[in-house]
Amino acid sequence: MQRICLFPGTFDPVTLGHTDIINRALPLFDRIIVGIGINSAKNPMFTPEQRMEWLATIYQDEPKVESLVYDGLTIHLCQKLGAQFILRGIRYVSDFEYEKTIADANRTLDRNIETIFLTGEPKYTSVASTIVRDILRNGGNADPFLPTAVIQSLQK
């Protein structure tokens, strides 16, 4: 049986913090599906298609990583995909408290799907999409927080 993992988020934009979690999860799973969630409470800066394109470029040589766009409950997408694991990145203790609440709810909805937490590398702790979007909106240089594929795309 394949170990299929869903890594849900908005990825607006894809950051080095995101790729750090994906890269370190690669040896743990047979497939990592990056689920780009449509969240009506958030006002995205980039289209879902642009975020998928970035992920496809970044992981073009890694067949274990794919991406898709979804809305609705993450647990329902896991069930549809046959994913037994949800991957979440943790930067701070406050992230853990928030993510544990969601993991507990997901476990109540489906006891067969386990949430796996990976802590981010310390050098990426301050990397958050919200901060990166603020830097970009205000004409700052967000390059230190972004993968090369995202930087090159934004320079066009």
Image: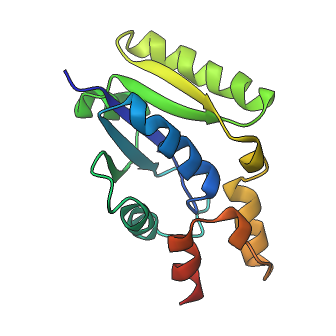
Q: How many marks?
A: 0
Give the quadrant of the N terminus: top left
Viewer-proximal residue, 51 or 1?
1
- Image location of residue 126, percent across then percent down: 79, 50
Q: Is residue 156 above or below residue 7?
A: below
- Image location of residue 107, percent across then percent down: 46, 13
Q: Quadrant of residue 110?
A: top left
- Colouring method of the image: rainbow
Visible in this render: residue 79? yes
Q: Is residue 108 above or below residue 81?
A: above
Viewer-proximal residue, 35 or 61?
61
Say left or right for 38 vs 82. right
Viewer-proximal residue, 92 or 49?
92
Q: Residue at x 61, y 61 (%)?
A: 43
- Image location of residue 44, percent across then percent down: 58, 63
Q: Quadrant of residue 84?
A: top left
Q: Residue at x 38, y 18 (%)?
A: 113
Visible in this render: residue 73? no
Q: Residue furthest bottom?
A: 156
Q: Residue furthest left?
A: 1
Q: Residue at x 29, y 33 (%)?
A: 30
- Image location of residue 139, percent across then percent down: 78, 83
